[in-house]
Image: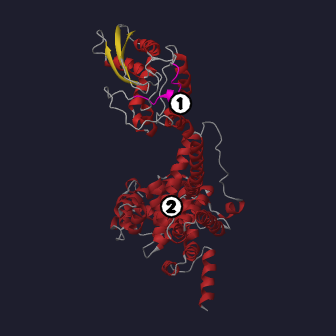
Amino acid sequence: MEASQRTLAQEDRREGTSSVAPHAIDAEALGALMRGERRSALRTLMEGYGVSLYRYCYSILGSRTMTDDVHQSVLLQVYEGLGSFSGDSFRPWLYAIAHNRCMDALKVARRYEKRFSMPGQLPDKADESPSTEERIHAAFASTSLTECLGELKYHVRVAVVLRFQEGFSYEEMGRICRERPETLKMRVARSMPVLRKCLEGKGVLR
Amino acid sequence: MSSEEERCDRFDREGILLLEADQPLLEHCRSCVSCRAAHEKHLQIVNRLATCAEQIYPPADWMARIEGEIDKQESVDVDVSQWSGDAERYSRVTQGPMKRGVVTPKVARSSARHMLQILAASSFPVLCLGLLYAAVKMNEQGPGSIREPAAAVSTQEAPSAPSAFRNPGLVPAPSPQGEEPSPASPAAPEAVVSPRNRAADSRRNAKQAKSPSVKAPPSTAKDKKGTAAEKSTSIFDAGLDLLPHSSGSSEAEGSSPFNREAAQIALQSSAAQAAQCRKGSRRSGSGVAHVAFHTSGRVHSIELQMPNARHDAKRKACIESAFIRTLIVPFSGSSPTMAQPFTY
């Protein structure tokens, strides 16, 4: 009975529509860790937070290719760090790792662009435009919002995404970004009018 | 809506912060049209931000890909650990936290470390075998060349210990004349040089082994340079008397009386060699060497009279080393002192 419930919950999570509360996922993962089953704990965390982590990385990076790489490296690092995990909530920890890896990836990308990009030459990267299906489903507003988010500075973008997309409190955001909650609050407050003006300029908000 | 209200940005300046701090909105923001509109748009943005990434999904096999990557990483670590037989490291890798980040550098690091271990482990027996081989070869060849004069000398060994040298800085070499004892005939210089040349080969070997057991031959002046003579002196100083056969060879005593003519010829050869000590210096001079011979045929003592080079110790040592190598046929009876003029 318990096993079947667990399976259903896992299937639910795989679809990205997890109805299981974060504390339940954390408890399950912690239980697996206590039993010494690191691989099982990782699987639980992947099922619980994997998709949202991917979305977060995509929102920050704005590129499928980079997001795939960073997402994988985040979860590999999570697996490595599980043995030394000492907290009681996995979610901020996972996002902190993702935050650092995204920052690294952006730095690398920036360095690469600085060194190898030639003026007047086409960029040497894969076609990042959404597929047909994505085009059908994706709303124009969403695309514009993503574009406007991309125009924000990295730290501002992270703060906005963590606050409004992932729903973190400012205390949790402070732990993830290693900054004071007041700083992050001010950053978010300053960025919202900029975002609004950007969307108004694109005709999304009238 | 007035233009003043349109330009109102109080919501942007204060309203958003209040909302983020979970505090009630200002009354102004409720009444001001511009602020109210901004508030509505703010809420729209917040809602769209919450849902904008909902259509984004990772690739279908992302979990399998990550688990496969972990499997690959662990298999590499386990293989490397089992290869070196390090059980402790194996348990650390599989149970404990791994190092963060990239897989490839870690594997490369561990591979390089283990390659070094393997190389060190495999080179040790090879090195041992090489040393063993060299030792065997040394036993077969090296001691022979060193033993050669000792064996020859041992037939003429005298029981008495060598007397102390008057000049302690110059230690005599074992006599190569002992190798070919021909006491009946006076030692012509050629006859003396011949065994010396043979001994020179041994000396080269002995130089390499830093055990100068064979005496440096006083060959012709053209062959030998002054610097070489100095080197030879230093070699002799290095402790020739420590060798077991060197003391024995100095005690060999001949049966024939002292041959003054042969000694004079040998001293003239040494004087020609001493002339090389001038090399590298503009100053020249002449002097007289008073040489006393031991009954074994080797030089017993040297006294140099060099009026123009009182303070030139280096040159004096060079000339001394040229004369100290003078060898004559062992003789019996008293050992006279001979004077040999030389130039330098």
Q: Tag on residue B179? A: 1
The residue positioned 51% from the left and 24% from the top of the image is B183
Residue B253 versus residue B344: which sits nearer the camera? B253
> Are there few (<14), some (14-19), or many (20+) residues within 10 Å of tag 2?
some
Q: Which mark is residue A71?
A: none
For the residues labelled 2 and 1, the Cα–Cα distance comes to 76 Å
Give left or right: position of A105 versus B338: right
Q: Are marks 2 and 1 on the same chain?
A: yes
Farthest right residue in view: A132
Question: What's the magenta region?
Answer: B172-185
Q: Residue at x 64, y 64 (%)?
A: B72
- Residue B275 on the magenta span: no
In the displayed structure, would residue B136 be above or below residue B101? above
**In this view, A70 is above or below B167:** below
- Expressed as whole percent of the image width and height from the top left, the position of residue A7 reads 63, 83
Residue that mark 2 sits on: B100
Q: Residues within 10 Å of mark 1 (few under 14, many from 20)?
A: many
Pick the front one: B3 or A140? A140
Quadrant containing the N terminus of chain B in the rendered view: bottom left
Q: Amino acid at mark 1?
A: Glu
